[in-house]
Image: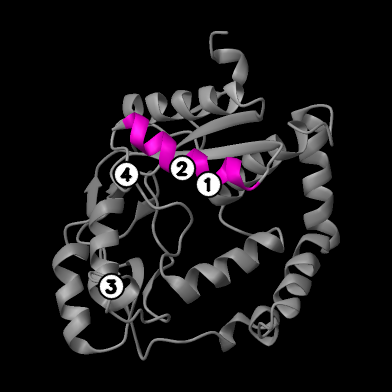
Amino acid sequence: SIPLLTASIMCKKLAEGIDALVLDVKWGRGAFMQTLDQARALARSMVAVGKAMGKKVTALLTPMNQPLGRACGNALEVAESVDCLRGRGPADLMEVTLALTAEMLVLPGVEPDTASALRRLHAALDSGEAFRRFRDMTATQGGDVAMLDDPEKLPQAPIQRPLPAPATGFVTRADADALGRGILLLGGGRMKTTDTIEPSVGISALAKQGEHVEKGSPLMIIHAADETRFNAAMEWFGKAFTIGPAAPPPEPAVTERIGMEDIPA
């Protein structure tokens, strides 16, 4: 229900007393909105509500048919986020993050346009300021900054095994839904409220769609807490990838932008 989703999401944002809001609306196999049309309808509805409330709102529609970045799982994603804040994160994750933050600088008038915003963001990454700010925030909230300075100190799963490619060719599918279900079985998420999340589990070094792989080379590294969960997750991981003779057309990291100017008065 688009109206109910809109109300659920926007009421919380508006109650915070915001002046501007940038929304990342995912669509695809690993997203709540499975199709682009569904995501577009939700984005337009939320932007319309923001506009009606006198707020500056834009939405970026971004695909989630395959995972964003190369890591999935709690500690593994923290480590990847540190890489991003140091300016060396995966290309698709960096592109989406920079696009969203550039919007956030332009909406309230901090920067006059996207090009200026991106220059400011790259300068913050190149100078180390982005990472330093995150480190300071973590310290202020009582976090262990030693884990940020050396992500190897984050929780490590005792089992770390590659998933070998079944054939030589190009990755034509790295299904986000199947990978997510496998990570859930590893203990990376909850199936019921009483479940305990295992922070060390997940996947890393993920091969992305369009990349060439050799038979037997790793499609990803699986991080598991025990053999039982590893074997359960393999039922999903084994069918997450398709290898073909040719690379699929590249998918843009940002599919579409919907702003207030796209909403009728």
Find residue 260 and report its image quarter: top right
Residue at image mark 2: 9
Q: Main secondary structure of the magenta part?
A: helix
Disc on the earlier residue, 4 or 2: 2
From the viewer's side, name the closer residue of 177 and 5.
5
Q: Amino acid at mark 4?
A: Phe
Q: CB under 8 Å between callouts 1 and 4?
A: no
Residue at image mark 1: 12
Q: Which element is circle 2 on?
A: helix
Side of 111 relative to 38 (left or right): right
Q: Amino acid at mark 3?
A: Thr
Disc on the earlier residue, 2 or 3: 2
Disc on the earlier residue, 3 or 4: 4
Please state, as top left, top right, bottom left or bottom right, where the C terminus lies in the image: top right
Q: Which mark is residue 32?
A: 4
**Residue closest to the far front:** 15
In the depicted structure, whether residue 140 falls above or below residue 6: below
Few, some or many C-alpha atoms within 10 Å of disc 2 (few <14, some 14-19, many ≥20)? few
Residue at image mark 3: 193
